[in-house]
Amino acid sequence: MRNRNRQGNAPYPYPPMAETREQINPKVGATTKTLLLTYCQEKHTTQSEVVEAALHTFLHPKEGDDLAMVMLQLLHGIAAKQETLEQGVAAMVPLLATIVERLEDAKVEPAVPIARYDQMYEALRPAPLPDAVEVPPAVPPAPVPAAGWWGRVFAPRTAP
């Protein structure tokens, strides 16, 4: 049967596209990576084929597979991690309570005042202000400058 377009009347000029592959970036432990590389070398296959087959088997198990055992092992691992976390949190509660008690019991010491320079060094102290304020003598008004030739020509006229 030849490849035909959607209407079914003319063949495609090229064969149908092969299944596309998507890249995933899982993080695995060093031992898992070593086991994967060893298996791939022994079976003369690629890592992507092995991972794809393993994921397919894990996600779509056959009836004879021990999926329940695999899931049970995974659940035991998760439960062990959860138990470790619970123990860690339980150990932190008394420690935090002790820290809070010590912080509450700590007395706040009053801050020691820091001396200023003029308090420490007498040479920097300002001179005392005099008791009476001296009034400077009255300054006589400044003499009026003599007007030059232009000043006399354009001087304002005064009334006679």
Image (spheres, rainbow, N blue to C red):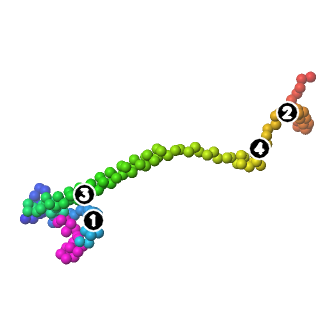
Amino acid type indicated by mark 2: Val
- Residue neighbourhood size for the residue with mark 3, other residues' Cα within 10 Å, grouped as few (<14), some (14–19), many (≥20): few
Q: Which stretch did the figure color magenta?
A: 36-54
Cα–Cα span, label 2 and label 3: 93 Å
Question: Could you tell whether 150 is left or right of 117 in the image?
Answer: right
In this picture, is 8 found above or below 145?
below
* Residue receiving disc 3: 80
Q: Secondary structure at mark 1?
A: loop
Point out residue 131 in the picture as x, y percentages from the top left corner.
81, 34
Question: Along the line of sight, which residue is nearer the eye, 35 or 25?
Answer: 35
Tags 4 and 1 touching, CB below 8 Å = no
Residue assigned mark 4:
126
- Name the residue carrying label 1: 28
Q: Earlier in the sequence, mark 4 or mark 3?
A: 3
Give the amino acid type for the residue marked by disc 3 in the picture: Ala
Tell me which residue sits at (88%, 27%) in the image.
157
Q: CA distance from mark 4 to mark 1?
A: 76 Å
Verify whether residue 57 appears in magenta. Answer: no
For label 2, the SS is loop
Pointers 4 and 2 in contact (C-beta within 8 Å)? no
Q: Which residue is mark 2?
A: 135
Q: Where in the figure is residue 4, as x and y percent of width and height?
A: 11, 61
Task: Tell me residue 27's x, y (percent).
Answer: 29, 63
Nearer the observer: mark 2 or 3; the answer is: 3
Can you say which quadrant of the picture contains the C terminus?
top right
| Residue 49 on the magenta span | yes
Q: Nearer the viewer, mark 4 or mark 1?
A: 4
Q: Callout 1, which amino acid? A: Val
Q: Nearer the viewer, mark 4 or mark 3?
A: 3
